[in-house]
Image (tube, rainbow, N blue to C red):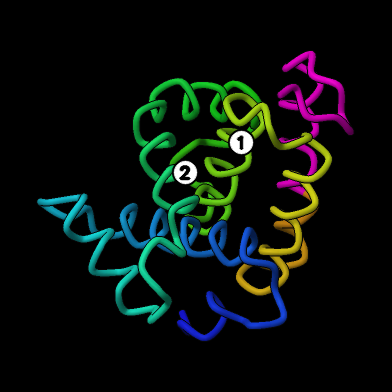
Amino acid sequence: MDLDLIVNPEWSPRRQNRTAAFRFLYQWEMNPPDDLSAELNEFLDRLEKKEGYFGYAIELVDGILAKLEEIDSLINELVDNWEFSRIAKTDLAILRLGIYEILYRLDVPPVVVIDEALEISKDFCSDNSRKFLNGVLDQVSKRSGRPNRESMV
């Protein structure tokens, strides 16, 4: 994947952080590092932003990996007639990111999370993926019981 897509200057800092987290989760899924923290820091350093710029990305990756079993269990439950192992790794990374934000980042309204996930998917996934991602994330949003357009903080 092109690192330029992660730091597109036209994107908001939040989207750049989400995209960095997505990209790292994809990389982690394909080749899990021995030292996760060191690998994440090295990955973010290569993006050449000022210190602390990717703080939200670090929060996302740490949170997702801490809740990975719960998130993956939910994905497995929601993807009818589809084996978990057959989910495209890019789709899986976006689902993990979106589900984490919907369930655990109460400062971000679910509608924003879904929109951001679909925007990121435009650069990294197929057209069919967007329909799949939207369907799964919409189900998670409904199950969460959160107001769709409001933060809970």
Q: Tell me the crowding category of disc 1: few under 14, some 14 to 19, or many 20 or more residues within 10 angstroms, Cα based.
A: many
| Front in this rendered view, residue 148 or 150 | 150
Q: Quadrant of the image for the C terminus? A: top right
- Residue 49 spot, x, y in % from top left: 42, 77
Membership of 139 in magenta stretch: yes
Local crowd at mark 2 within 10 Å, few (<14), some, or many (≥20)? many
Q: Is residue 20 left or right of residue 65?
A: right
Q: Along the polypeptide, which appears first: circle 1 or circle 2?
A: 2
The residue beneath circle 2 is 60
Disc 1 marks a residue whose amino acid type is: Glu
Q: Residue at x 49, y 50 (%)?
A: 56
Task: Name the residue beneath numbered marker 1.
Answer: 101
Measured along the vertical axis of the image, is residue 73 above or below residue 100?
above
Residue 14 found in image quarter: bottom right
Tell me, yes or no, if residue 80 can be seen here.
Answer: no
61 versus 49 height, above or below: above
- CB atoms at circles 1 and 2 under 8 Å apart? yes
Q: CA distance from mark 1 to mark 2?
A: 8 Å
The spot of residue 22 in percent (x, y) is: 50, 57
What numbered label is drawn on residue 128? none
Seen as rendered, the residue at the extreme left is 34
Callout 2 amino acid? Leu
Q: Dot 2: what SS?
A: helix
User: What is the magenta range?
Assistant: 132-153
Q: Position of residue 96 (x, y in %)?
A: 53, 40
Task: Specify whether residue 101 is in view.
Answer: yes
Q: Is 124 a magenta residue?
A: no
Q: Residue at x 35, y 62 (%)?
A: 27
Q: Position of residue 10 (x, y in %)?
A: 72, 81
Quarter of the rendering containing residue 38: bottom left
Residue found 71% across the figure and 37% down from its top: 108
